[in-house]
């Protein structure tokens, strides 16, 4: 049993002027929480490099030191992992590139969506770009796309959706996670995370508006309704008062070790947001809920 009351702080990993920790996603397997995130390093020449980083914990209290899984390359800047899914004998993790070849503040139009594959959640393949607009659309014509998330269709097993930020949230589908067809888009924030509410047969879409963690619901991915935005303890958290964002919800209600929804997110400081909005001196945070409405977190 994991005792949430023993967690000393809502901050999992603190950022500073040099290092930012952003865009978390988590998978729980074999008693281990594996957290993947954007590891953003500001070097002495004011150049920001992005990496896919990972840390692990068995109790949500003690976390391992970061391990970087992708290369140092401004033309790639792999980052913003969406989630990890299981297909046949493989684990598949989706992520983005965030190219800043001239140290741009935000990624260029060449940002694209990729997946990495693993048999053991430890050793990962080279990233493979997803042709989310369909096999007939060249990579250079797909447009800027970031913040992916994969989920199997709630009604049609074997049909997979990829949600990603492009003109709101765009959606493409596939039956093998290789060949994709474009479906459409809707108005939405970034860093989408999608759950299925079986009680009322709906998708629950967690997203990031300008500030806070937003929520939408839809039964068919066509008709959507807003549920609201929550900001947790942001008013009392100096480390998150610049922006609280990038919420990822891990449904552990069926896991007796926790029995709740866990929310992972990042918060940026006002100073960091003013200096480099895409860095933000960002820290990773944790909260939890029984119903996706009422939230709690460690104190302070």
Image: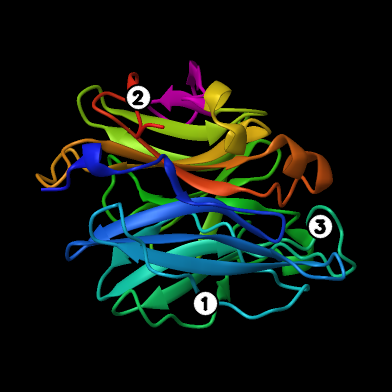
Measure the alpha-carbon separation of dots 1 and 2.
32 Å
User: What residue lies at 70% left-to-right and 46% top-to-bottom?
Assistant: 280
Task: Give 66 or 173, whichever is nearer the viewer.
Answer: 66
- Magenta stretch: residue 232 in it? yes
Whether residue 264 is situated above or below residue 87 in the rendered picture: above
Which secondary structure lies at badge 1? loop
Q: Is residue 80 left or right of residue 160?
A: right
Q: Residues within 10 Å of mark 2 (few under 14, many from 20)?
A: some
- Which type of secondary structure does the marked residue at label 3 adopt? loop
The image quarter in which residue 43 lies: bottom right
Residue 45 lies, in percent from the top left, at 87, 70
- Numbered label attached to residue 109: 3
Report if residue 149 is visible in the image.
no
| Circle 1 residue | 69
Q: Residue at x 56, y 28 (%)?
A: 212
Looking at the rendered structure, the number of numbered marks drawn on it comes to 3
List the residue tagged with mark 2.
295
Q: Position of residue 170 (x, y in %)?
A: 60, 42
- Where are the magenta residues, as a range? 213-233
Residue 102 is tagged as none
Q: Of helix, strand and loop, which one carries label 2?
A: strand
Assess whether residue 114 is covered by the magenta stretch: no
- Whether tag 3 and tag 1 are in contact, CB under 8 A, the answer is no
- Between tags 1 and 2, which lies in front? 2
Along the line of sight, which residue is nearer the eye, 86 or 183?
86
* Sequence-earlier tag: 3 or 2: 3
Between the C-alphas of marks 3 and 2, the distance is 37 Å
Q: Earlier in the sequence, mark 3 or mark 1?
A: 1
């Amino acid at each position: 049993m994991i005792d949430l009351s023993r967690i000393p702080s809502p901050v999992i990993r603190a950022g500073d002027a040099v290092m930012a920790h952003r865009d978390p996603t988590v998978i729980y397997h074999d008693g281990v929480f594996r957290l993947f995130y954007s590891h953003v390093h500001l070097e002495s020449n004011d150049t920001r490099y992005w990496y896919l980083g990972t840390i692990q914990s068995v109790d949500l209290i003690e976390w391992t030191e970061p391990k970087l899984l992708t290369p140092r390359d401004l033309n790639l800047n792999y980052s913003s992992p969406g989630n990890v899914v299981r297909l046949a004998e493989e684990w598949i993790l989706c992520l983005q590139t965030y190219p800043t070849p001239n140290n741009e503040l935000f990624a260029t139009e060449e940002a694209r969506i990729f997946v990495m594959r693993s048999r053991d959640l430890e050793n990962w393949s080279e990233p493979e770009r997803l042709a989310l607009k369909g096999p007939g659309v060249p990579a250079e014509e797909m447009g800027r796309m970031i913040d992916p998330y994969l989920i199997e269709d709630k009604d049609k097993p074997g049909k997979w959706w990829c949600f990603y930020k492009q003109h709101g949230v765009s959606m493409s589908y596939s039956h093998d996670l290789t060949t994709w067809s474009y479906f459409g888009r809707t108005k939405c924030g970034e860093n989408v995370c999608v759950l299925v509410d079986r009680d009322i047969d709906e998708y629950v879409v967690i997203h990031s508006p300008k500030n806070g963690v937003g929520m939408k619901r839809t039964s068919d991915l066509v008709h959507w309704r807003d549920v609201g935005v929550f900001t947790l303890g942001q008013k009392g958290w100096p480390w998150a008062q610049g922006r609280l964002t990038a919420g990822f919800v891990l449904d552990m209600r069926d896991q007796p070790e926790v029995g709740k929804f866990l929310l992972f997110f990042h918060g940026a400081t006002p100073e960091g947001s003013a200096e480099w909005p895409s860095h933000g001196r960002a820290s990773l945070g944790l909260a939890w809920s029984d119903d996706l409405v009422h939230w709690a977190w460690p104190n302070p």
